[in-house]
Image: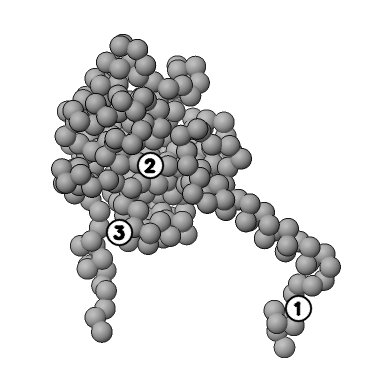
Amino acid sequence: MSTVTASSRKEHRITARSLAARKRRGEPITMLTAYDFTFARIFDQAEIELLLVGDSLGNVVQGADTTLPVTMDEVIYHTRMVARGAQRALVIGDMPFGSYQISEEDAVKNAIRLVKEGGAAAVKLEGGTKMASTIERIVCAEIPVMGHVGLTPQAVHRMGGFRVQGRGEAGRTQVRDDALAVQEAGAFAVVLEGIPAELAKEVTAELAIPTIGIGAGVHCDGQVLVMHDLLGLNDWAPSFVKQYANIGAEVSKAARAYADEVKHRKFPDEQHSYK
């Protein structure tokens, strides 16, 4: 019987470079967020190709209203756990607000931290034309970059809330320009969030790099969801989300059953006690 070695597993890893070939072949790309070892391992074994350690952890892990309070150290901490659980998937660390906006030098330093300390194989940052030179600098440091345009959560205050972008001629032009700028800067892929499906279709056709949609319709090269939305762990989710399980209800049911048995001294019983 042959043994699967660490080196043989690495041969099957998804890489930033391999995604362009998937786009050319018309193979849809799957991406989910993950924040710890356990779910990273489960998603990896389910053959999810990209695992994003999103700054969405501010919302779904920390309970904040926005992603803005998330720190670099927190993203590194969660990325390290996800990297341990991923044998095949490409692990992407999200660059939090303030980690790349101040200067390009800061951006490169923080991207390097995500790779060295967090174990990420790529980083993601928000912004198009305004962040093109920053993306280029990080790519020059030999770190693959995923862009993110359209609805960019770190710009929530400028946008006046989490609003659909790319409506109207000016809005459509801005999204196109941003996506093209990200590509020209050397990004290997770009997230299209919260834009009309028809616009996402047009941008996907224009770009050579893969597009990953979230609230952007079916015509993107891939799709991403926040795991808590996918699994029904949130009380509320955006209208574009499809809930594939209701684990929240099952967890609540299990916790209530456990509490009931403890209160009535049914647990632990003889089967679950040492002799």
Tell whether label 3 touches label 2 (CB within 8 Å). Answer: no
Provide the residue designation for mark 3: 88
Which is nearer the N-term, disc 1 or disc 2? 2
Q: Identify the residue at image location x=29%, y=46%.
A: 29
Q: Amino acid at mark 3?
A: Arg
Q: Mark 1 or mark 2, which is nearer to you?
A: 2
Residue 154, horizontal then vertical, whole percent: 43, 27
Q: Identify the residue at image location x=78%, y=66%.
A: 262
Mark 2 neighbour class, 10 Å CA radius: few under 14, some 14 to 19, many 20 or more: many
Provide the residue designation for mark 1: 269
Q: Amino acid at mark 2?
A: Val
Tell whether label 2 touches label 1 (CB within 8 Å). Answer: no
Residue 241 in view in this figure? yes
Q: Is residue 84 left or right of residue 207?
A: right
Q: Amino acid at mark 1?
A: Asp
Q: Mark 2 or mark 3, which is nearer to you?
A: 2
User: Secondary structure under badge 1?
Assistant: loop
240 vs 102: above or below: below
User: Secondary structure under badge 2?
Assistant: strand
**Separation of disc 3 and disc 1 at Cα?**
41 Å
Which is nearer the N-term, disc 3 or disc 1? 3
Rendering quarter of residue 130? top left
**Separation of disc 2 and disc 3 at Cα?**
17 Å
Residue 12, horizontal then vertical, whole percent: 23, 61
Which is nearer the N-term, disc 2 or disc 3? 3
